[in-house]
Amino acid sequence: MGDERVRLDKWLWAARFFRTRNLAKQAIEGGKVWYDGARTRVSREVHVGAELRVRQGFDERTVIVRALSTERRGAPEAAVLYEETADSVAARAAATERRRLERAGAGAPAQRPDKRERRLIHRFRERNDA
């Protein structure tokens, strides 16, 4: 910790946002990482106090860089490298809850179909495939 010059892909890897530097590179090139409100390059130098927006799957995090490191260490040490904003935490919690409610309301069957219902399903599929 405390190195003065750190590439963005290396910092994201060290902060444990991505499992490999190659995945971090692909995310940056794909526009999933924004540095101070703008798309950025892989080789961008990270500075303390910079704001990063990182999209991973369904979640998007907004973090402030608090420290620099080129070494990947344990999760507790990596968490010291950044601080997630309160708005980001609230937005991720709301999105998670919204996804959970959508899954619950999807109408998944309460039980597996019995023998008669399976026969009806097979007949229906055979007729519609032809």
Image (tube, helix red, strand yellow):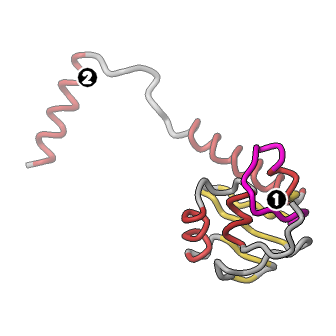
User: CA–CA distance between discs 2 and 1?
Assistant: 46 Å
Q: At label 1, which amino acid type do we have?
A: Ser
- Say which quarter of the image contains residue 62: bottom right
- Residue occupying image coordinates x 13% and y 48%: 129
Indicate yes or no whether the magenta region holds residue 72: yes
Q: Position of residue 88 (x, y in %)?
A: 82, 59
103 or 16, which is in the foreground? 16
Q: Is residue 26 above or below residue 115?
A: below
17 or 36, which is in the foreground? 17
Q: Main secondary structure of the magenta part?
A: loop
- Residue occupying image coordinates x 72% and y 81%: 44
93 or 124, which is in the foreground? 93
Q: Position of residue 130 (x, y in %)?
A: 7, 49
> Is residue 40 visible in this depiction of the protein?
yes
> Is residue 64 visible in this depiction of the protein?
no
Drawn side of residue 50 relative to residue 125, left or right: right
Instruction: Tell me the element at label 2.
Output: helix
Q: Is residue 7 above or below residue 86?
A: below
Instruction: Identify the disc placed on residue 117.
Output: 2
Q: Position of residue 10 (x, y in %)?
A: 69, 66
Q: Earlier in the sequence, mark 2 or mark 1?
A: 1
Q: Position of residue 9 (x, y in %)?
A: 67, 69
The range drawn in magenta is: 65-77
Which residue bears the numbered disc 1?
Answer: 88
- Say which quarter of the image contains residue 38: bottom right
Which residue ends up furthest to the left in the rendered image? 130
Drawn side of residue 2 relative to residue 60, left or right: right
Q: At label 2, which amino acid type do we have?
A: Glu
